[in-house]
Image (spheres, rainbow, N blue to C red):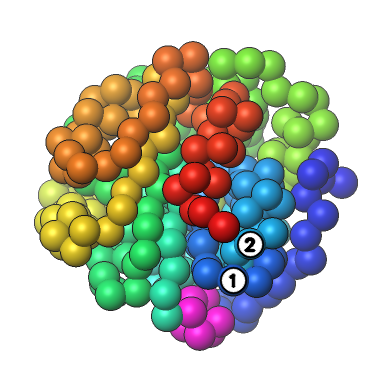
Amino acid sequence: MYPDYPFLPNFLEINGGRLHYIDEGVGPVIVMVHGNPTWSYYFRHLISSLSNNYRIIAIDHMGCGLSDKPSDYSYCLAQHIENLDCLLRHLRIDRYSLVVHDWGGAIGIGCAVNHIHRIEKIVVMNTAAFRSTRIPLRIQLCRLPLLGEIIVRLFNGFAWPARFMAVKKKMDPAVAKAYLAPYNSWKNRVAIFNFVKDIPLNSHHKSYATLVDIEKRLSLLRDAAIPLLIVWGGGDFCFNDDFYEEWKKRFPEAESHYFEDGGHYILEDKLNEIEPILKTFFPV
């Protein structure tokens, strides 16, 4: 059903639903944290290649992928961070590296800054863990009262166009189908819409203080000399070069790789170039 995704499902009962996650391989732990509107499927190729020498944990946030999609749920940044932390506690993981993309940046690094001593390495891909007032018009439309919910949940106007808007080379139809499969109804698009609503643009937003706290503590990661790798698609309409430059400014010692012709779903566009980079960053 999901091409190149042969992994056994795992579930954890947590905070009112079943959280799905992938747990593959043996060795040092790498935790992969997806964004919106993707799911652990986004990391499928990295899971396969790195699990030969590492233990790979890839979460599906509540409401995403193969996790439950409760309608009455606190789909906010703090809750997603708590869910990830709970999963890692459940698995008794006390040392790990992170690979984060899109919303996974704020969620994964939000978890990391609470436990600096547990973090070994971090890879950031077209993401942010700091404030920005920039938001593309097409995403603004999806946040509008009533209309935004109709666009995202009734017409699938966020996940469906990502098939071609988030990539620079055409996505294989079977892969596009797999990305969309978990989000096939109004009910199952609840988290997608709530992720869009949860973008904190001002101090009145419920997740603003959480994001500010993460941003303030990013320096702890730098001060701890945790190796950070930046892998960036330059053709991203959402996380554009401003975000890339902000990461480099905050982490001047970071190794960075910029792909001018890569889109937001950088792993779909540039997998062949990125895999060797990550295998060097995570050596055998």
Image quarter for residue 232?
A: top left
Quarter of the C terminus within the rendering: bottom right
Give the residue drawn at x 26%, y 70%: 116
Give the residue drawn at x 79%, y 44%: 4
Span highlighted in magenta in the image? 86-93
| Label 2 element class | loop
Residue positioned most to the front: 284
Q: Which residue is mark 2?
A: 53
Question: Within the magenta stretch, is there residue 90?
Answer: yes
Query: Which of 148 and 13 lies nearest the eye of the viewer?
Result: 13
Asked if residue 280 shows in the view, the reply is yes
Q: Disc 2 or 1, which lies upstream in sequence?
A: 1
Q: The disc labelled 2 sits on which kind of residue?
A: Asn
Question: Within the magenta stretch, is there residue 187?
Answer: no
Query: Which of 5 and 72 lies nearest the eye of the viewer?
Result: 5
Q: Is residue 128 above or below residue 173?
A: below
- Marks counted in the figure total 2
Q: Main secondary structure of the magenta part?
A: helix
Query: Which of 219 and 55 lies nearest the eye of the viewer?
Result: 55
Label 2: how many residues lie within 10 Å, few (<14), some (14-19) or many (20+)? some
Separation (CA) of disc 2 from disc 1: 6 Å
Q: Which residue is mark 1?
A: 27
From the top left corner, tell me how far across and down residue 163 is, in percent.
Answer: 64, 26
Please give left or right for residue 254 compared with residue 170 in the image: left
Q: The disc labelled 1 sits on which kind of residue?
A: Gly
Q: Are marks 2 and 1 in contact (CB under 8 Å)?
A: yes
| Label 1 element class | loop
From the top left corner, tell me how far across and down residue 130 is, in percent.
Answer: 22, 46
Label 1: how many residues lie within 10 Å, few (<14), some (14-19) or many (20+)? few
